[in-house]
Image (cartoon, rainbow, N blue to C red):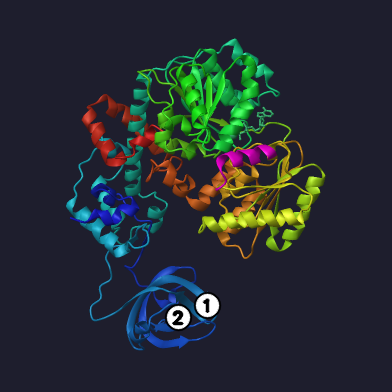
Amino acid sequence: MTDLTQFARLGIRTESDLLLHLPLRYEDETRITEIGRVRPGETVQVAGEICRNEVVARPRRMLQIELDDGSGRIALRFLNFYGSQVAQLAIGRRVRAMGEVRGGLFGLEMVHPRYRLLGGQDKLPTTLTPVYPTVAGIGQTVLRRAILEALARTNWEDTLPAGCAQRLGLPELMSSLRLLHQPPPGTPLSSLEDRSHPACRRLAFEELLAQQLSLRRARAARSLQRAQPLRVTEQVERLRSALPFALTGAQQRAWAEVSADLSGSQPMNRLLQGDVGSGKTVIAALAAMQAIGSGRQAALMAPTEILAEQHHRKLLPWLEPLGVRVAWLAGSLPASAKKSVRAAAARAEVDLLVGTHALVEDSVELPALGLAIVDEQHRFGVAQRLALRATRGDVLPHQLMMSATPIPRTLAMSYYADLDVSVIDELPPGRTPVLTKLVTESRRTEVIERVRAAAALGRQAYWVCPLIEESEALELQTAIDTHAELELVLEGLRVGLVHGRLAPGLKAQTMAAFSAGELDVLVATTVIEVGVDVPNASLMVIEHAERFGLAQLHQLRGRVGRGSAESVCVLLYRPPLSANARERLRTMYETTDGFEIARRDLNLRGPGEFLGARQSGLSLLRFADLERDAELVEAARIEAAAMLAGPSAAVDAHLQRWLAGREEFLKA
Ligand code: ADP
Ligand code: MG
């Protein structure tokens, strides 16, 4: 039996995981290409006799080998090499080498090819060579062997309904898996890579069927749950007409969806997505009012004190005039104050409780909780989100989650199975789009002058210090130094500083001062939170912008452009830029549309990274793609309905194989 613990870092825990760990790509070592026929840009395998072996010193030290197969010559270049390699690759030896061909200065070459010295009888492999996703310390050979061994001793029974595969023209499961791990020569690589090969479609279908089954089961389970229906009372209308603005069309649509859910007797489970500044808070306020107007309590949880505090400040003047009792709870509150808030909440003398995760950690009782609102939901763990609406008897509170990370709709569906989604895809009127400037670091002094000029006009500026992933201490130090520097150069201006190590109270105080216009410049590490709203701030400078991810840059830029003044975001960068960093900065320059940015970010990073798999759990879909496999989704829907009408053991077996351990995510 293979020791699976060594593969835990790859998310492989069971033998099934091992079988379902599919190659990223394949290399074709079953064929040899004549050197005379290879072209730059191709990845090929060649074989020939070594006719040159030289260690050159310039432009840098490297080993130069040349192979000749009678049809032509190709150079193999090694920048890192051992002395033993120089001896091994002696003139006259025969070698097989695989790699990408480049057109070098003196002809064709491969840089760091994979190679093998040829002896007497070297048979070519008979299948394509799989290349698996892996991490440092787990080699391809070990992984390949373990997977092949697992394949050899496994014989999975089909869990699809009888006749289903034939109806859809899909091959058998085991032969599909074998093909994917060991494609016979001649298998068109392109059909494996774009996943149009029938074997890939079989896996995609299996997975989509599992998704449909679990989704329908979750829906069915939810339809059995009960929630208190919340009425739209006259207070909701009063709040709406008391707002200093009219709702945008997108807000009206979102509000109609939320409000309709709330008036139902099934618990709402809805995600409200909207770009930064799109106005999600007011929907939360209206929803809270609908709950409170119906005699229930509401809770609003935000991921940080700054954010929670801001919600509190914003909601108070809207709700208090309507007789709503709003309270605030966060870790930094003195113990005695916490205690009295908890006591009031437990006696239902608090209508709306706003706060941080203290809401779920300090055993707060909200006996009449009718609505739980979670802001920036992706920053909470599943458990925390669930805790806020923990069951009280058999009646569940409604749940509204909000997120400023726009996720393309199809992706959202594949990650959040049993969740309804509302989208605010329009910004409130009167915003001037933020102008983005890309400026090299060498012009930093000019940028500082810009800050001074903005302050002279009564505008405020954020100055974001670089992200230093390797060292939090260094990041902190840089922020402190930048603050000191700007205070010195910008004499006469009021320069504040916030960073992650500041005591929460102090952080909130500084933010409040900036908000009130008592500071001209706010120097910050990346802690200037998602969601902070200071309309008078119209200039943002981000140092070393090339180090930030797209989502982060977009969130940061969203802090400005909230008022009517023309806003500017200066992205200071240090050349030379990597191709990826260049693409990120170009995207920021070209568009302010959060969904477009999310789309490009997704292209640059792939879905797992994009959604921050580390914190949000695993993707539900590993093999299927809702867009590419659209007709399979439809087929899966039909088959799932039929399967659920049959014996539940069949459904269980299929789910166990494809979703084991991931169901938790469905509840999120
Ligand atoms: P986010 O979606 O990022 O949480 P907020 O709810 O903080 O956005 O709203 C951003 C700003 O826009 C706030 O100052 C809010 O009062 C304002 N706002 C929201 N909706 C409208 C609207 N329909 N018209 C004008 N301003 C609005
Ligand atoms: Mg917000």
One can see residue 592 in this view: no
* Image quadrant in which you'd find residue 139: bottom left
Whether residue 512 is in magenta: the answer is yes
Dot 2 surroundings within 10 Å: few (below 14), some, or many (20 or more)? many
Residue 85 is situated, as x and y percent measured from the top left of the image, at: 36, 82
**Label number found at residue 75:** 2
Give the position of the C terminus as an image quadrant.
top left
User: Would you say 53 lies left or right of 130 here?
Assistant: right
Which amino acid type is shown beneath numbered disc 1?
Gly
Residue depicted at 63% across the width and 33% down the height: 278
Instruction: Name the dominant secondary structure of the magenta segment.
Output: helix
Dot 1 surroundings within 10 Å: few (below 14), some, or many (20 or more)? few
Number of numbered discs: 2
The mark nearer the N terminus, 2 or 1, is 2
Residue that extends furthest to the front in the rendered view of this protein:
336
Residue 187 is situated, as x and y percent measured from the top left of the image, at: 33, 58
Whether residue 510 is in magenta: the answer is yes
Is label 1's Cβ within 8 Å of ligand 1?
no
User: Would you say 47 lies left or right of 37 here?
Assistant: left
One can see residue 147 in this view: yes
Residue 88 is situated, as x and y percent measured from the top left of the image, at: 33, 84
**Label number found at residue 559:** none
Q: Which residue is mark 1?
A: 104
Is label 2's Cβ within 8 Å of ligand 1?
no
* Image quadrant in which you'd find residue 433: top right
User: Would you say 588 lies left or right of 50 here?
Assistant: right
Are the residues flagged by discs 2 and 1 in contact, CB closer than 8 Å? yes
Q: In which quadrant of this rendering is ligand 2 seen? A: top right
Q: Please tell me whether residue 11 is drawn above or below residue 347 in the rendered image.
A: below
SS for tag 2?
A: strand
SS for tag 1?
A: strand
